[in-house]
Amino acid sequence: MKTAHKPRSEMVAETRAKLTAAARRAFATVGYANASMDDFTADAGLTRGALYHHFGDKKGLFEAVVAQIDREMSVRLNVISAKATTRWQGFVDENIAYVEMALEPEIQRIMLRDGPGVLGDPAQWPNANACIMSITTNLAALKEEGVIRDIDPEAMARLISGASLYAAQWIANSDDPGATSKKAVKAFRALMEGLLVDNKCPG
Amino acid sequence: MKTAHKPRSEMVAETRAKLTAAARRAFATVGYANASMDDFTADAGLTRGALYHHFGDKKGLFEAVVAQIDREMSVRLNVISAKATTRWQGFVDENIAYVEMALEPEIQRIMLRDGPGVLGDPAQWPNANACIMSITTNLAALKEEGVIRDIDPEAMARLISGASLYAAQWIANSDDPGATSKKAVKAFRALMEGLLVDNKCPG
DNA sequence: TTCGTTCACATACGCCGCGTATGTAAGTGG
DNA sequence: CCACTTACATACGCGGCGTATGTGAACGAA
């Protein structure tokens, strides 16, 4: 016997996992457009037939990869915000972590560069972008508690999210990511502190 | 005679203009990936030969279109900021205009969606994104005058720019762009007012 | 004016990548 | 044990891109 007989559902899960893993690597390195389906399915020890069977088309597989990464990001962010002592602190930490996560090439390329081009506005993605929802609920609670000024939580969440993403791109493409990251985080902190009700130009 | 004889340089300029115009329409409507070079060169009354001669490849033509739109945006923004009475007012107006401009489908698709995917980080584009530079210089001046708090102008310009872009995408994809636009502009204004030194929870 | 050169395209060809239609072996339920 | 479905692989055709080549018109020099 070559391989022990497993139930079919397990084999399927394995196949899907192999495909998403191989595609994820290809998308992250050469980008969506330059990733050949023949190539990365072969890397997974399969053919395009398997891909079309499970994911419909190239875009479908890309969606699956995006969803996977989004889940991972969400988990990591929740861990960070849970550690904080105050809600405001957690909020700030979470956003800064978001900026820093976007430094990772995989997230940079798949989620920030190719993602919007292939799937459209991130806010409209199937999984509804767990990150933005998290920010929104945090802002709503902070407003309720009187910590921040009276602003629309969702609108502000979008703005902050956009600022994070763009900052990350700036950092990732700069000559000295370390130094740029410091500047970006500092400015980002200042931007958010402007939302506090008792904002008094902190020294 | 079919056409009056013009000097060669004029004919070339005309050809380039026809190509960029046709490509611009195609890119704006069906997107970069789905725009067939054979199709839109034919629309311009030409063939792919002309395209490769003048722009090298599809990406090269896309760059030219992006540069053209960027110049137009820059001009429009300058007009707006010039009208304002104070520097701060001009700064705010310019940014809000930026958000609103991004509602236009052409800018939305070419500059915000496909642009980053095809050409990479907007901050690294050949023309160096005139908009960001404009914001940066404004922030530097405002800091000098003591209107805003002590922050790194370039870093803050990136954050604000990112917030604008993202807000625009949110608006453009929403069910009720008009209402969403109002919410976004209000939040955006609040975000920027947080930068003022004498920020005292206005309203 | 004329002739050689360069320019500004058009034409022709081949390759690669995607999608679909079809084949097939293994698994599954009755 | 058999009919049916599932999970892939294989085969085929088409469209899009890049390149190599062809061609007529514009320009400069004698």
Image (tube, coloured by chain):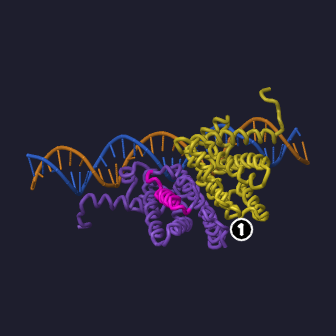
Chain colours: A yellow, B purple, C orange, D blue
Residue appearing at x 69%, y 42% in the figure: A20
- The residue closer to the viewer here, B108 or A201, is A201
Q: State which region is magenta.
A: B126-147
Q: Position of residue D22 (x, y in %)?
A: 30, 46
Q: Residue furthest top?
A: A1
- The residue closer to the viewer here, B19 or A191, is A191
User: Label 1 amino acid?
Assistant: Asp
Do we see residue B27 in this rendering? no
Q: Which residue is mark 1?
A: A150
Q: How many marks?
A: 1
Q: Residue furthest front?
A: A203
- The residue closer to the viewer here, A32 or A12, is A32
Residue A13 counted in the magenta span: no
Q: Position of residue B119 (x, y in %)?
A: 50, 50
The quadrant of the picture occupied by the N terminus of chain B is bottom left
Q: Is residue B177 left or right of residue B23?
A: right
Q: Under tag 1, what secondary structure?
A: loop
Quadrant housing residue A133: bottom right
The subunit carrying tag 1 is: A
- Residue A150, above or below A176: below
Do we see residue A46 in this rendering? yes
Q: Position of residue B176 (x, y in %)?
A: 65, 71
- Residue A120, above or below A15: below
Residue appearing at x 56%, y 49% in the figure: A170
The quadrant of the picture occupied by the C terminus of chain B is bottom right
Residue appearing at x 66%, y 57% in the figure: A192
Residue B141 counted in the magenta span: yes
The majority secondary structure of the magenta stretch comes to helix
Q: Position of residue D24 (x, y in %)?
A: 25, 55
Residue appearing at x 36%, y 54% in the figure: B50
- The residue closer to the viewer here, A6 or A125, is A125
Q: Residues within 10 Å of mark 1 (few under 14, many from 20)?
A: some
